[in-house]
Image (cartoon, grey):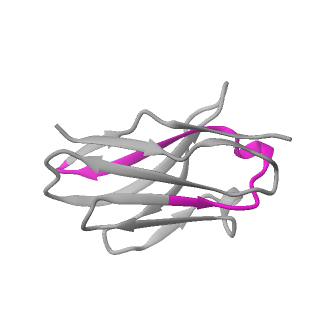
Amino acid sequence: QVQLVESGGGLVQPGGSLTLTCIASGNVFSTYAMAWYRQSPGNQRELVATITSGGQTTYTDSVKGRFTISRNYHNHTMWLQMSNLKPEDTAVYHCNGALNYAIYWGQGTQVTVSS
């Protein structure tokens, strides 16, 4: 059974930094695109960043220049480096991946940006 598990969330002051990690465990034999989404109370889930198996990346406009998505293809790990965090970045961040010809989601990790 494949699982995605996120870690690295927490409370940070505005202007601070956090790095989120997503690890795929289980019998992973193929990986394609992976992504980070976020959802704050009362809002729809928002696509934050994507990365293909070839390393191509995309970002939503509000995080460009502040967030960096990366991955290690061989050990099925993905990261989201977040800097210059703003209160509006507060949300539950979810890992998403196309693995073994199916789509998987992690449970999410809370990021709170507040002074």
Q: Residue lying at the far right in this picture: please name it.
A: 115
Q: Position of residue 38 (x, y in %)?
A: 57, 41
- The image quadrant of residue 102 is top left
Camera-side residue of 93 and 7? 7
The quadrant of the rendering that contains the N terminus is top left
Asked if residue 6 is among those painted magenta in the image, a careful observer would answer no
Camera-side residue of 94 and 103? 94
Asked if residue 72 lies left or right of residue 36, the reply is left
The quadrant of the rendering that contains the C terminus is top right
Camera-side residue of 53 and 115? 115
Asked if residue 76 lies left or right of residue 110, the reply is left
Residue ID at (65%, 30%):
43
Q: Residue lying at the far top in this picture: please name it.
A: 42
Q: Position of residue 36 (x, y in %)?
A: 49, 50
Placement of 66 over or under 21, stated as above or below: below
Placement of 23 over or under 30, stated as above or below: above
- The image quadrant of residue 29 is bottom left
- Which region shows up in magenta? 80-101
Q: Position of residue 44 (x, y in %)?
A: 59, 33
Asked if residue 33 lies left or right of residue 115, the reply is left
Q: Position of residue 62 (x, y in %)?
A: 70, 57
Count of marks overlaid on the render: 0
Asked if residue 34 lies left or right of residue 58, the reply is left
Camera-side residue of 115 and 67? 115
